[in-house]
Each structure stands twice: as C-alpha cells, then as structure tokens.
Amino acid sequence: MKKAANVSHSIVAVAKDDAQFKAVEARRQDGIVEVVWARSLPAEGRTWADFAAECGFPTGGEGRDRTQKRYTDSVVGLDAAGVVFYRISAPAVGGEETAAIVRMQAESLLPLPAEQIEVAWRAMPSRNGKVDITIAAARKEYLQRFAGGVQDFRPRNILLTCEGIARAWQHFFSDRRQQAVIVSIGTENTQICLARDGCVTHAAMLDTGMTDLTRPDDRTEPGEIMGRFAQDMRAVLGSFAWNESEAWPVFVLSDGRESIEHIVGSLDAAGLDAQVAVPGPRGLKTPAGFETADLYEYRVPLGLALAALDEPSGTLDLFQGIKGADEKTGSARQSLILAGVIAVAMFIALIVTWRSVDVALAKRLNRQVADPAFEAAWQHQALIKTVARHRPDVLQLLTDINAGQNDGIVLDSLHFKKGQVVSITGRAGNADQMYKFQTGLLEQKGITDVEISNSAVDTKSKKIKFTITFHYRGFTEKEAIL
C-alpha cells in the first residue's frame, strides 16, 4: 500500500498563448506538483501537429498505427474567442431539472438552432433556494474543427484556457480572494475571468494585448490607447454584473515587469481597483533553470495541468457531446465492419444452398400463382397501392404552405377537399406581405393557380384580411380519382 501511495500521475498540458504553442508535463506525487519539462514553439507557420511531434507525440500515420507510449494523458486548452458566457439564476432543483432550465435559456439567448451549438454549465452552491449558473456555449462546427486540429495529442480533455488561468492564479499567484476578476494580458489579446473559489463564473476576451498597450502606432497617443483599454474593461465588467459600490478586486497577472505595473496604475486611476499579482513557486517543484518568469510564461498550461490532475469533473466541458458522438461513430464503424463480415458469410452460405432449393421454390410459386385466392390477393394489394398513391397528404400541404414567404402572415383557416380548390384565410400586416405570401406559394412545387379572391382592411386591427385559393397537385381537379 505504501508503494502505491508514491505512484505519480503525469499529464501533458498544451495551449496556444501569446502567439506560441506552449506545453508542460506535470505530475503530482505525495501532494506535490512537479514540472517535469516545459516547451514552446512559435505558432506562425506551424500547426498543432508540428507541436505534437515537438512534444514527442507520434503524428500522422505513425500516430494512427500505434498508441503513444510515454504519455498516457494530455489536456489541451481552447481560448474563449469563440465561446460566449452567460450567468443565470434559477431555483435550486435537481440536476435533470437544472439541465432542462439551462438548455431552454441557452436556446432563447443564442441566435442559432439547438443542433448547431454545444452548451456546458456549472452551478455554484445554492443560497436561499436559488443557485447561480454559469453557461458556456459555442458553435458545434467550431469545436469539431478545433478537436480535429489537436487530435495528434489524443487529449483526455479539452478545457477552456480561462479555467487554467483561474487555477494558476489560485495556486501560484499572490493575494488570492474568494471572488475576483483575473486579467491575463497576452501579446495579442487579453483574457478576463471572473473567478469564485477558483472556478470561472464568467469570461471574456479583448483583442488588445501588450503590443498595443506598450507600442501603439504613430497615429495613437499612449494615453488614448490606455483610455480605450480601461473603457473596454469597464464594458466587460459591466457584462459580469460588476457593481462599483461592491466592486470585486481586479488582479492583473504579472511577472514583475514595469510595463504591466504602468497598465495596472492606469486601470486603478480609472477606478477599477486594479492590483498586480505576481507568481511564486509555493507547493511547486520545478526543474533546474525554471525561474519565476517561466512560471508566468507557462501560467496557462500549468493551470490546465492542475485542473486535469484534480480530475476536471467540475469544469465547463464543451466537448462532452462531441466526444460522445465520436465514440458512437467509432462503435458504429466497428458494428458496420462486423455486419459486413457476417453478410459475406451469409452470402456464401446462400450461394451454396441456392442451387438445391431453386427448383422446388419455382414449382411452389407456380402452384400459388395458379390459385384463384392468390389472384384476388394480388388485386387487393394493387387497390391498396392505388388508394395510397392518390390519398391527399395534409401534412405535406401544410409544410408547403409554410415553406414560402410568410413573414407577418397569420393563417386562420384551411379548406381542403378532394376535387375542390384549396382555400386558406388569414391576416397580413400590409399588402406587400400578402403579395409576397402569394408569390411564395407559387414557388412551391405542386401549387398552381394561386389567386387572391378576397382582401379587405380590418377596421379594428388595421390588418389585411384575405382569402387565397389554389390548386394542389392532382387532388383539387374535379376528375380526381377516388
């Protein structure tokens, strides 16, 4: 038992940060986190696959042919650029009821169909029968592309980099609070996270980074760019429901350089209560030559490694549905291969037995065809098919009516009877909407002779009441069968 307690768990954490790919291998043993190595690669002109090879992961055909031997686990970070966050308050109910509330709220807040988005959520401890819920959402296509790009790392999890920033601040940086705003200024952008008890409850990203703040172009004064940055920060904090009377402290992560001190001073002067947070290697074992500046440089992958080592069941996992779909696809592929093997075997058996039963089967069929009962059954089946072919499909008719231009149109009634024209009555906001609706019906296959037979302005609602008639396929002709 004592030997098992000393076994270390190792993980490789990877992120794209400051226009570089960065990775660390970290492990925890006897409660101490150790950084085994840290590596980086400029991102310009390089891919995730290039960096995977740099970190010792087999890529391409080699990666598909054999499993990676040295590293059993990895985690990759996704920045918040393509992710939106919401915070809602809901009754403290069970997990299934909360999930239903989250899905309903997400569908009402996002301008995309539910099947095109992935949603992750996390509920904070309830207070007075209410619970605060953080919702993260992103386009499914965007997540699938990212997962495909990092597949050479074979990540156990793909986490949001803001989760790594919050973990790094909680473990390695000075002056921790129960709730605070954490600002991580990169070369090209700035990530802003609202963290409570080490968990992200809101996040946003600004496209302003150290390059803009310390080396503005010739047309922009330094004070002007700092003023815009402070204004953008206020806008983000406002979206976090920031209240100046009960303002949360704002911690700007820093390696101690003067340029960040100057930025913090400007934010503090703008009334944002900004402070500097510097790293310290407490509770962390590092390799030789790994300095405090390196701890700041690799803060994102280090935080992701901590989240993964802590078993990230409570993280915002936007890729859970995508991983489930991939697993189902793999299972379906295996089932398809197995089905193919069985089908081939059955086909061979069929060929072997076919010759022996073919003559007997032909004789039996000839006897059945000659039977008068068989002839009657055949005629009955033909009649059923004729009826089905000429039966009106009301659901398809409704689908065709709603497929055209129907903005502002409210339908009141529908009359559909074999051998008669289809008649619909409704209301339109104006004449233009009514005529567009008529045109839209004409564009539908099977709808012809669309006529507005009656239209008048309702004196109370000021809307146009109308009646439209049209022919639908062959069902409305007087000589229609059946």
Image (spheres, rainbow, N blue to C red):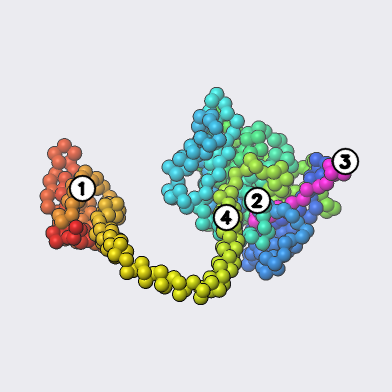
> In whole angstroms, how far apart are the C-alphas of marks 1 and 2?
54 Å
Looking at the rendered structure, the kind of residue marked 2 is Asn
In the displayed structure, does residue 141 sit left or right of residue 470? Answer: right
* Circle nearer the N terminus (4, 3): 3
> In whole angstroms, how far apart are the C-alphas of marks 1 and 4?
44 Å
* Circle nearer the N terminus (1, 4): 4
Answer whether residue 137 is visible to the viewer in this image.
yes
Identify the residue under disc 1: 414
* Residue 37, quarter of the rendered image: bottom right
Task: Indicate which label's residue lies in the foreground, 2 or 3.
Answer: 3
Q: In the image, which residues are magenta?
A: 1-17
Looking at the rendered structure, the kind of residue marked 3 is Lys
Q: Residue at x 45, y 44 (%)?
A: 107
* Residue 372, quarter of the rendered image: bottom left
Where residue 102 appears, x then y in whole percent?
50, 39
Determine the secondary structure under disc 2. strand
Q: Residues within 10 Å of mark 2 (few under 14, many from 20)?
A: many
- Quadrant, the N terminus: top right
Looking at the rendered structure, the kind of residue marked 1 is Leu
Q: Which mark is residue 2?
A: 3
Depicted 149 relative to depicted 463: above or below: below
Q: Which mark is residue 157?
A: 2
* Circle nearer the N terminus (1, 2): 2
Q: Residue at x 39, y 69 (%)?
A: 365
> In whole angstroms, how far apart are the C-alphas of marks 2 and 3?
30 Å
* Circle nearer the N terminus (2, 3): 3
Determine the secondary structure under disc 3. helix
